[in-house]
Image: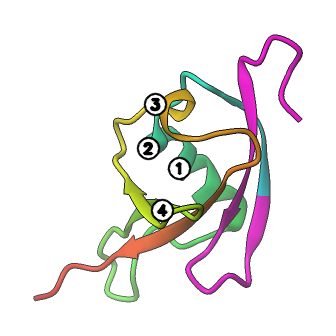
Amino acid sequence: MSDVNGATLELEALDVTGQLRTKLDRVSREATIGEIGRRARAQLRLPDSDPDGRQVHYRIRRDRDLHHLHDSEVAGEVLSEESRITLLPDIAAG
């Protein structure tokens, strides 16, 4: 639940399979999507590198409309209370 002043959000984050999920409580409306993604990745215990040791970057998808959010976007502008987001590994070919 958000705080009394509405300065925070409660979100649900899932991995790409939908099998792992976590609640993100008291997320600042001023937080960037990149910050939220790092917090969600840690709580979901998703790997930060692939089997070859390359760093894995996760993109964030807003599940309501399947819109991919940019790391620099601000939570209060693109998410609402109890939004659900999915972390998608950004896989680079090559």
What amino acid is labelled 2 in the image? Gly
Q: Is residue 57 magenta?
A: no
How far apart are the alpha carbons under marks 2 and 1?
6 Å
Q: Residue at x 34, y 47 (%)?
A: 70
State the SS at label 4. strand
Q: Nearer the viewer, mark 2 or mark 1?
A: 2
In the image, residue 56 sits, relative to residue 22, either above or below, namely below
Which residue bears the numbered disc 4?
A: 61
**Residue 94 as seen in the image, left or right of residue 44:** left
Range of the magenta residues? 1-22
Labels 3 and 2: the sequence-earlier one: 2
Q: How is the image coloured?
A: rainbow
Q: Are marks 1 and 4 in contact (CB under 8 Å)?
A: no
**In what quadrant of the picture does the C terminus appear?**
bottom left
Q: Position of residue 42 (x, y in %)?
A: 63, 57
Labels 1 and 4: the sequence-earlier one: 1
Q: Are marks 2 and 1 in contact (CB under 8 Å)?
A: yes
What amino acid is labelled 3 in the image? Val
Farthest residue toward the top?
A: 5
Number of dots carrying numbers = 4
State the SS at label 3. loop
